[in-house]
Amino acid sequence: GQQLNQSPQSMFIQEGEDVSMNCTSSSIFNTWLWYKQDPGEGPVLLIALYKAGELTSNGRLTAQFGITRKDSFLNISASIPSDVGIYFCAGAEYALNFGKGTSLLVTP
Amino acid sequence: EAQVTQNPRYLITVTGKKLTVTCSQNMNHEYMSWYRQDPGLGLRQIYYSMNVEVTDKGDVPEGYKVSRKEKRNFPLILESPSPNQTSLYFCASSFGVGSPLHFGNGTRLTVT
């Protein structure tokens, strides 16, 4: 599969802070997805993006499909302890390719 | 409830002892896939299946086999497990390649 560059690799923040992470690709994608993996569980889909420039929210989460179609961003506002987990981006030109994940730790 | 079910959740075995991890989905999905997750390496695809009797290699297929005799089931077979196959394994399914995947809860395999 194709390599996606996801950053940062890990984040350690305080409750209430906003979080930003991003994913870039060398290829143009027509789908960007963001998943969250809770400890001991499988990844769960948070947001799906299908159009360049699209901005979609899911509660405190907001994701954007970059206009170049080679990147995507995920923001979490006012983080809470249950936001802890690994966040994965995935992009598809045809098949899905996954980033290596951003590990988020939130302290009360 | 729509779900992907993997069994077992935890498995400890010895080198060379054949094992099968089962995967079943109840969403009538055509596409199914197996991934392994290792620290620092993210999710790597082992095998995938576009439909019944159609399977293909992913990025890390060595040492694994799969079969897709029925639409709902996609077992992962390790004929002769080795310690480098110690990992967390996920089965996933979707309506088609490139569509959002639904993941199972994982199987943590340890090979000694």
Image: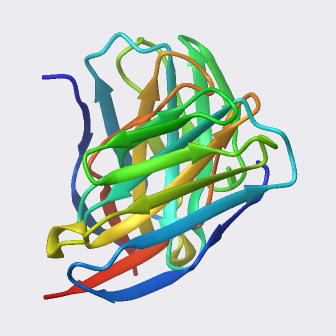
| Residue lying at the far right of the rendered structure | A26
Give A75 or B69, whichever is nearer the viewer.
A75
Give B43 or B68, whichever is nearer the viewer.
B43
Q: Is residue B77 above or below residue B52?
A: below
Q: Which residue is rendered at x = 35% and y = 52% of the image?
A: A61
Is residue B75 something one can see in this rendering?
no
Q: Is residue A17 above or below residue A79?
A: below
Q: Is residue A1 above or below residue B37?
A: above
The location of residue B6, given as percent across then percent down, is 27, 42
Give B56 or B15, whichever is nearer the viewer.
B56
Position of A68 with respect to A52 (left or right) is right
Position of A37 with respect to B49 (left or right) is left
Would you identify the image quadrant in which residue A58 lies? top left
In this rendering, the count of numbered labels is 0
Q: How is the image coloured?
A: rainbow
The location of residue A29, given as percent across then percent down, is 76, 36
Q: Is residue A84 above or below residue A52?
A: below
Q: Quadrant of the C terminus of chain A?
A: bottom left
Q: Which residue is rendered at x = 56% and y = 17% of the image?
A: B96
Q: Which residue is rendered at x = 83% and y = 39% of the image?
A: A28
The location of residue B59, given as percent across then percent down, is 72, 51
Q: Which residue is rendered at x = 50% and y = 79% of the image?
A: B39
Would you identify the image quadrant in which residue B3 lies? top left
Position of B45 with respect to B93 (left or right) is right
Is residue A106 something one can see in this rendering?
yes
The location of residue B79, given as percent across then percent down, is 52, 51
